[in-house]
Image: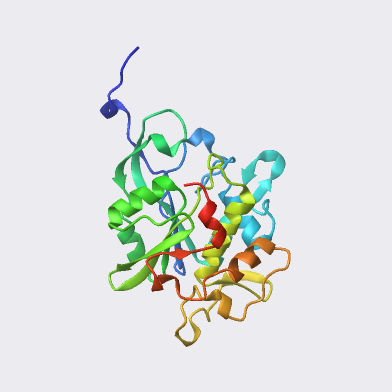
């Protein structure tokens, strides 16, 4: 058996630049893209077996296949995804720009971060951003180590100060199917997070409400604002109704949903 030194494993560089809409209020950070042979599109969360775009479709359109180009082709619709992200003000990147794959698979467990992402530069380029969301354990570990903050429980957030700006760091369940949670439950957790950060269902569409901070209220006080929730999206409606009445950053952590306490670590 031939032993290979870690230093002999090639370093992979991130294939894409950050996706940073000027209006972004939320920055979602994953770990690192899988190998190109696992892509079904040339964009973030490209693996057909990763459920991120199904989660988004379920939350915002009550249709998990909303971002599917053609189900028979097993492709996500990049154009539709980009339009959605720009409309909603959601930025995307990953917590590493260079990695080594210690095993020839897509598991985060075998990713060695060679060069962490300069997330501070990303936030400086996103002046309206009030929340950073880690979409898995590896992303959470990498960000918390770099930022020097405590790791919140899944579905919770930890507030931190960034150059005088109050930002909330959320730890979300992984959208990978390797994470043992049904898609509907993952969508509930993500929906509650979006509800706490100023995303409301108003006049027939989800979006960032320009009145999210009326009378000095923080965006996470979604329950107290006049917003109309789509009847068909029951889990999102329930998640928002369970959102804490007090601002997320009053405490060190904030629950996105009471049910999250039973989620796998």
How many numbered marks are there? 0
Tell me which residue sits at (66%, 49%) in the image.
68
* 71 left or right, relative to 76: right
Q: Above or below — where is 111 with respect to 52?
A: above
Please tell me whether residue 35 is drawn above or below residue 199 in the rendered image. above
Indicate the position of residue 39 as horizontal and vertical percent values: 53, 39
> In this picture, is 216 found above or below 143?
below
Q: Position of residue 153 (x, y in %)?
A: 43, 55
The residue furthest top is: 1
Quick check: can you spot residue 77?
no
The quadrant the N terminus occupies is top left
Q: Quadrant of residue 168?
A: bottom left
Of residues 137 and 203, which is closer to you in this image? 137
Q: Colour mode?
A: rainbow
Camera-side residue: 184 or 206? 184
Judged left or right of residue 90, residue 227 is right
**Identity of the residue drawn at 36% across and 55% down:** 151
**Quick check: can you spot residue 161?**
yes
In percent of width and height, residue 106 lies at: 47, 35
Determine the residue positioned at 66% across, 48% down.
69
Please tell me in which quadrant of the rendered image residue 231 appears. Answer: bottom right
Which residue is found at the position 40% from the left and 49% from the top? 139
Q: Quadrant of residue 199?
A: bottom right
Q: Nearer the viewer, residue 70 or 90?
A: 90
């Amino acid at each position: 058996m031939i032993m290979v030194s870690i230093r002999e494993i090639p370093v992979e560089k991130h294939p894409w630049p950050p996706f940073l809409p000027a209006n972004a209020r939320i920055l979602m950070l994953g770990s690192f893209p899988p190998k190109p042979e696992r892509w079904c599109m040339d964009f973030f969360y490209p693996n057909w077996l990763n459920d991120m775009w199904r989660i988004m479709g379920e939350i915002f359109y009550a249709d998990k296949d909303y971002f599917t180009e053609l189900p028979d082709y097993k492709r996500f619709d990049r154009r539709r995804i980009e339009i959605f992200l720009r409309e909603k003000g959601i930025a995307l990147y990953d917590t590493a720009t260079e990695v080594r794959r210690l095993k020839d698979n897509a598991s985060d467990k075998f990713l060695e971060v060679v060069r962490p992402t300069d997330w501070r530069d990303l936030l400086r380029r996103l002046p309206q951003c009030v929340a950073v969301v880690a979409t898995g354990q590896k992303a959470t570990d990498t960000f918390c180590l770099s930022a020097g903050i405590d790791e919140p429980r899944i579905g919770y957030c930890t507030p931190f100060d960034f150059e005088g700006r109050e930002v909330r760091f959320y730890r979300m369940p992984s959208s990978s199917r390797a994470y043992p949670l049904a898609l509907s439950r993952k969508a509930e957790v993500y929906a509650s997070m979006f509800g706490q950060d100023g995303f409301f269902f108003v006049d027939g569409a989800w979006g960032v409400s320009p009145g999210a901070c009326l009378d000095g209220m923080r965006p996470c006080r979604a329950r107290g604002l006049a917003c109309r929730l789509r009847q068909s999206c029951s889990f999102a409606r329930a998640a928002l109704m369970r959102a804490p009445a007090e601002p997320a950053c009053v405490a060190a952590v904030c629950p996105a949903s009471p049910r999250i306490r039973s989620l796998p670590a």
